[in-house]
Image (cartoon, grey):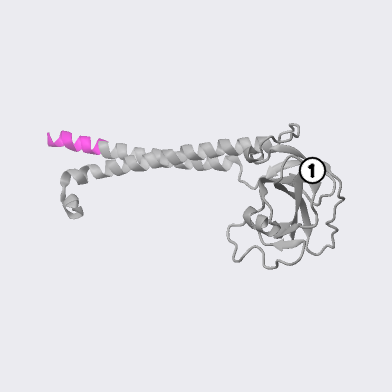
């Protein structure tokens, strides 16, 4: 069947134009997709930089990244997680993840209290009284490739994990967790180094990609137009 098509003059005559139309459609779609991504990034950065008040969520599952939240409850510092291999200012350390029991839910909330260097002897303990904590909704740190299991030791606390997922932390804690992580506000007490920043490229990167896709669509359109013009001249010459 393919051989027959390759021998068909009409098919070969129109194949370049059909291919051009397909490529133009793909390039334009990718360009608009990059524009949508740029809008999303602008909205995310705007939310991150917002000075809105901290509010207690009515539905933790509906939180978006960098929502400003406050929660009343109690830290549970007897089962803390140290997320290993976190770089900061040229050094390697841990993120201190402390469970928090909100007064409004039986599920536990993970609180990222910030970064500590591996070489430091840091006191991770907390006072046991109930309190209100504030911060941004976020996620556990993630890595593209993780060669092994997150936890290799399961006997001691605090427990060191290599970029664990929420499910893996929940399994270690033997508790149900809320679907968000509270990034403790830099001014809050009983935290460590906290310089939260969106781990994303800026919207200008996506505008640049969109420009490239639209440019490629214009180039293919130009080539297709030139091809049509040439075909038209050939038809006039033959007539």
Residue drawn 66% across the image and 53% down it: 141
x 81%, y 64%: residue: 119
Could you tell me which residue is drawn at 54 percent across and 39 percent down?
37
Q: Nearer the viewer, residue 31 or 121?
A: 121
Asked whether residue 237 is in view, the answer is yes
Prevailing secondary structure of the magenta residues: helix
Residue underneath mark 1: 73
Q: Nearer the viewer, residue 151 or 136?
A: 151
> Which x, y percent locates residue 92?
74, 61
Image location (x, y in percent) of residue 14? 23, 42
Residue 188 percent across, percent down from the top left: 82, 43
Q: Which residues are magenta?
A: 229-239
Magenta span contains residue 185: no
Residue 219 visible: no
Residue 67, image quadrant: top right
Q: Is residue 142 above or below residue 64?
A: below
Q: Position of residue 8 (x, y in %)?
A: 16, 48
Q: Residue furthest top?
A: 52
Label 1: how many Cα within 10 Å (few below 14, some 14–19, many 20+): some
In the rendered image, the residue lying farthest to the front is 106
Closest to the observer: 154 or 23? 154
Quarter of the picture containing the C terminus is top left
Q: Secondary structure at mark 1?
A: strand
76 sits to left or right of 1: right
Residue 45's image quarter?
top right
């Amino acid at each position: 069947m393919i051989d027959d098509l390759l021998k068909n003059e009409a098919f070969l005559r129109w194949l370049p134009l059909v291919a051009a139309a397909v490529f133009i459609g793909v390039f334009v779609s990718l360009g608009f997709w990059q524009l949508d991504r740029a809008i999303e990034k602008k909205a995310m950065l705007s939310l991150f930089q917002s000075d809105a008040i901290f509010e207690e969520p009515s539905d933790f599952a509906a939180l978006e990244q960098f929502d400003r939240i406050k929660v009343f409850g109690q830290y549970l510092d007897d089962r803390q997680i140290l997320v290993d291999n976190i770089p900061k200012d040229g050094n390697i350390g841990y993120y201190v993840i402390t469970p928090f029991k909100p007064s409004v839910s039986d599920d536990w909330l993970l609180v990222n209290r910030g970064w500590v260097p591996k070489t430091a002897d840091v006191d991770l303990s907390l006072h046991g009284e109930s309190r209100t904590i504030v911060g941004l909704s976020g996620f556990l740190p993630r890595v593209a490739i993780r060669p092994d299991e997150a936890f290799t030791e399961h006997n001691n606390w605090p427990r060191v994990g290599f970029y664990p997922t929420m499910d893996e932390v929940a399994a270690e804690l033997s508790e149900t967790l809320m679907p968000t992580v509270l990034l403790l506000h830099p001014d809050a007490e009983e935290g460590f180094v906290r310089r939260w920043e969106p781990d994303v490229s800026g919207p200008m990167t996506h505008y640049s990609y969109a420009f490239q896709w639209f440019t490629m669509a214009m180039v293919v359109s130009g080539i297709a137009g030139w091809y049509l013009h040439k075909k038209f001249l050939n038809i006039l010459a033959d007539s």
